[in-house]
């Protein structure tokens, strides 16, 4: 029995993932990748560190994540969500869409709704934590504590690339244990 794919926010599974697998991000620029038919084309490849592994994701330039109300009759819906869906883009300008990625290893589709999941050194006290956020120009009104992880935080960002960029910039900072973009991932019920 086949079930439609759905999108779930990463924050919903963060308790399990953050405790089990540290993830930090580092972006790289353009790279060559091969299509299934063997042809070669240039694609945007991004990477982020997941524990001791580097995860490569490919920007799907032909897809977009957008509100269902913005979907027009010429769009092909790839994954239907209750409020937002992944669609095969038709050429048009000025729409408010989010980028869609796929793991290079062939996993489900992913997008960046905004935010960074951040875990700082569990030994740090409140003064060190406040200093870290201040030095990195992160205002207090953008920070929410993750109650299930000591010194775990959700940092608000704009949707899309700002999430990936902030996670990557924080990943190499002293005292950062985890710095991961808040991914929404396609899941398929079995």
Image: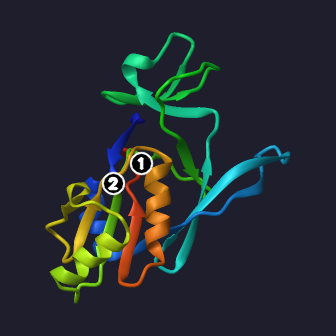
Earlier in the chain: of badge 2 and badge 1, it is 2
The reply, left or right, for residue 44 in relation to residue 14 is right
Mark 2, other Cα within 10 Å: few <14 / some 14–19 / many ≥20: some
In this rendering, is residue 113 above or below 48?
above
Q: Quadrant of residue 167?
A: bottom left
The image shows residue 65 at horizontal and vertical percentages of 47, 34
Q: CA distance from mark 2 to mark 1?
A: 7 Å
Dot 2 falls on a residue whose secondary structure is helix
Q: Quadrant of residue 24?
A: bottom left
Residue found farthest to the right: 39
In this rendering, is residue 157 above or below 132?
above
In the picture of the structure, the residue carrying the numbered disc 1 is 185
The image shows residue 148 at horizontal and vertical percentages of 16, 69
Which color scheme does this rendered protein use?
rainbow
In the picture of the structure, the residue carrying the numbered disc 2 is 10
The reply, left or right, for residue 72 in relation to residue 131 is right
Looking at the rendered structure, which numbered label has been put on residue 50?
Answer: none
Residue in the picture at 68% in, 50% down:
44
Mark 1, other Cα within 10 Å: few <14 / some 14–19 / many ≥20: many
The image shows residue 180 at horizontal and vertical percentages of 41, 64
In this rendering, is residue 60 above or below 69?
below
Given residues 104 and 181, the one toward you in this image is: 181
Residue in the picture at 46% in, 51% down:
162
Q: Quadrant of the N terminus?
A: top left
Residue found farthest to the bottom: 123
Dot 2 and dot 1 residues touching (CB under 8 Å) = yes
Badge count: 2
């Amino acid at each position: 029995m086949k079930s439609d794919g759905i999108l779930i926010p990463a924050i919903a599974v963060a308790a399990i993932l953050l405790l089990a697998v540290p993830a930090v991000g580092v972006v790289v620029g353009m790279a060559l990748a091969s299509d299934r038919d063997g042809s070669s084309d240039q694609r945007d490849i991004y990477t982020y560190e997941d524990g001791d592994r580097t995860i490569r994701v490919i920007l799907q330039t032909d897809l977009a994540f957008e509100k269902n109300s913005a979907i027009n009759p010429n769009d092909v819906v790839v994954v239907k969500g209750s409020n937002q869906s992944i669609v095969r883009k038709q050429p048009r300008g000025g729409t408010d869409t989010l980028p869609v990625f796929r793991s290079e290893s062939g996993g489900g589709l992913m997008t960046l709704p905004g935010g960074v999941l951040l875990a700082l050194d569990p030994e740090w006290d409140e003064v060190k934590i406040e200093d870290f956020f201040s030095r990195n120009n992160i205002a207090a009104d953008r920070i929410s504590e993750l109650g299930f992880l000591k010194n775990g935080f959700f940092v608000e960002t704009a949707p899309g690339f700002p999430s990936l960029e902030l996670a990557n910039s924080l990943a190499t900072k002293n005292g950062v244990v985890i710095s991961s973009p808040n991914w929404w991932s396609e899941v398929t019920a079995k």
